[in-house]
Image (spheres, rainbow, N blue to C red):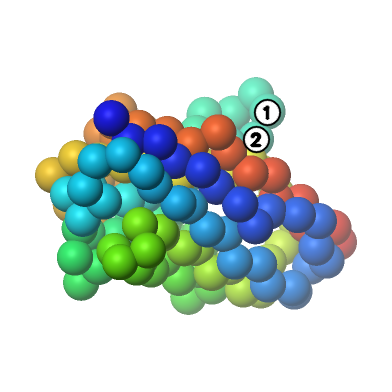
Amino acid sequence: QVQLVESGGGLVQAGDSLRLSCVASGRTFSSYAMGWFRQVPGKEREFVAAISRSGGSRFYADSVKGRFTISRDNAKNTVYLQMNSLNPEDTAVYYCAANEFGTSRHSSPPDYDYWGQGTQVTVSS
């Protein structure tokens, strides 16, 4: 069992940056590939980024490539999402998720075993 808690969301203006954090507790963090997803009301949960268990491999959605960076610190049981050049289309609830023994190529919600409660990111124009 893994518990995930996100933080770092907020209200920013277009062009600003935010860094989201997700702290994991429970079983060995390094056993899990980690992903970030986002969701807006009325739409399906959307893949944003994923990182392998070691952190050596990363995978991004086309919509965020070049603007967002996923990273992890296994010593701190934490995964991060650095978001730069934010635009209003990035407004959503952002969730982190854990995929036991997975890889960075897993980009579908059913691939993930555990989820955080989400953190709201709102980007004003």
- Say what amino acid the circle numbered 1 marks: Pro
Choose between 19 and 69: the one closer to the eye: 19
Residue 88 can be seen, yes or no: yes
Q: Is residue 108 visible?
A: no
Residue annotated with mark 2? 40
Q: Residues within 10 Å of mark 1 (few under 14, many from 20)?
A: few
Q: Is residue 6 left or right of residue 47?
A: right
Quick check: 39 left or right of 55? Answer: right
Q: Is residue 68 left or right of residue 57?
A: right
* Image quarter of residue 78: bottom left
Q: Tell me what residue is drawn at x 19 percent, y 40 percent.
A: 100
Picture quarter with the N terminus: top left
> How far across and how far down the image is residue 99, in percent?
25, 40
Q: Residues within 10 Å of mark 2 (few under 14, many from 20)?
A: some
For the point 46% across and 63% down, the residue is 80
Q: Name the secondary structure under disc 1.
A: loop
Q: Are marks 1 and 2 in contact (CB under 8 Å)?
A: yes
Position in image of residue 33 (x %, y %): 24, 51
Residue labelled with disc 1: 41
